[in-house]
Image (spheres, rainbow, N blue to C red):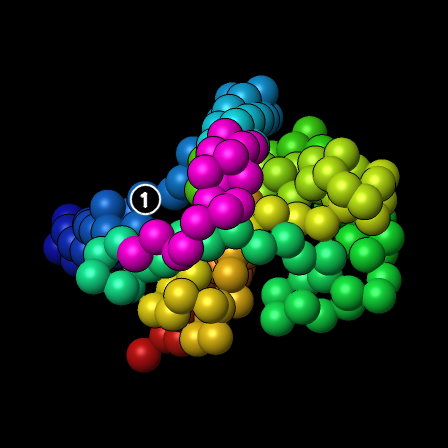
């Protein structure tokens, strides 16, 4: 009987050690509180919005009448353009559609923020929200008028006329980074509530 208990105990000890090892290698993520995640999201969005509007103000005041400014040996050029559409000048005849889409995105993020429990998702959505608000401000308050305003773009990569890549701004950069991070989190199985989807292991 003692030998049987010893054998059983060894088996249980081995299983416990394996479970402990797996738990150490893949510790469960601890979800953030919704308040903390919302604060991080809001701070990032506010930071992006302020930076976007300040740089646009500087671009309008300093780049309007001069030649493109060459930076980093030609890797970046600063030149002032105004875009009534999206990237590659798409949708220039339906400018009013973009503010509507922006309001929908903002509403969705605000709704998600109430149940948000992930720091990484807070960063991603904060970038998207800040970028959306930055360009929405141009649509609402710049010429030629509300819902028809042209977005101020001023950064061109590898070309002084936006021929290699569309001329963009800080809001566009934040949107791009936020969307890329969100896609990566989805691929990694990171949920917005702070939990993580784990693939089931096939027993040997």
Q: Is residue 63 visible?
A: yes
146 and 25: which is toward the camera? 146
Looking at the image, which residue is at 37% across and 74% down? Answer: 203
Looking at the image, which residue is at 46% across and 54% down? Answer: 79
19 and 60: which is toward the camera? 60
Number of marks in the image? 1
| Magenta span includes 14 | no
Q: Residue 63: percent from the left, percent from the top?
A: 47, 45
Where 93 sits versus 185, above or below? below
Q: Residue 106: percent from the left, percent from the top?
A: 73, 40
Q: Residue furthest bottom?
A: 204
Residue tagged by mark 1? 27
Where 200 sits versus 54, above or below? below
In this picture, residue 38 sits left or right of residue 184: right
Figure quadrant of residue 156: bottom left
In this picture, residue 69 sits left or right of residue 190: left
Q: Which residues are magenta?
A: 52-70
| Magenta span includes 55 | yes
Figure quadrant of residue 30: top left
Q: Residue 23: percent from the left, percent from the top?
A: 29, 47
Q: Is residue 173 visible?
A: no
Q: Split into 4 quadrants, where in the image is the C terminus?
A: bottom left
Looking at the image, which residue is at 57% across and 55% down? Answer: 81
Looking at the image, which residue is at 73% across and 38% down? Answer: 142
In this picture, residue 5 sits left or right of residue 91: left
168 and 62: which is toward the camera? 62
Tag 1 secondary structure = loop
Q: Residue 151: percent from the left, percent from the top?
A: 66, 49
Dot 1 alpha-carbon crowd within 10 angstroms: few under 14, some 14 to 19, many 20 or more:
few
């Amino acid at each position: 009987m003692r030998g049987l208990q010893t054998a059983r105990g060894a088996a249980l000890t081995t299983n416990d050690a394996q479970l402990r090892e797996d738990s150490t290698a893949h510790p469960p993520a601890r979800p953030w509180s919704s308040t903390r995640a919302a604060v991080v999201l809001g701070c990032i969005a506010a930071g992006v919005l302020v930076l976007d509007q300040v740089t646009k103000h500087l671009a309008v005041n300093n780049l309007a009448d001069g030649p493109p400014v060459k930076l980093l040996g030609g890797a970046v050029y600063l030149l002032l353009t105004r875009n009534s559409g999206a990237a590659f000048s798409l949708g220039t005849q339906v400018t009013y559609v973009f503010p509507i889409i922006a309001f929908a995105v903002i509403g969705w993020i605000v709704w998600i923020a109430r149940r948000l429990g992930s720091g990484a998702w807070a960063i991603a959505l904060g970038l998207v929200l800040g970028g959306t608000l930055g360009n929405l401000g141009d649509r609402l308050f710049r010429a030629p008028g509300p819902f028809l305003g042209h977005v101020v773009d001023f950064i061109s990569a590898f070309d002084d006329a936006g021929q290699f890549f569309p001329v963009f701004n800080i809001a566009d950069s934040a949107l791009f980074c936020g969307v890329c991070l969100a896609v990566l989190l989805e691929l990694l199985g990171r949920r917005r509530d702070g939990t993580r989807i784990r693939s089931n292991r096939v027993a040997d």
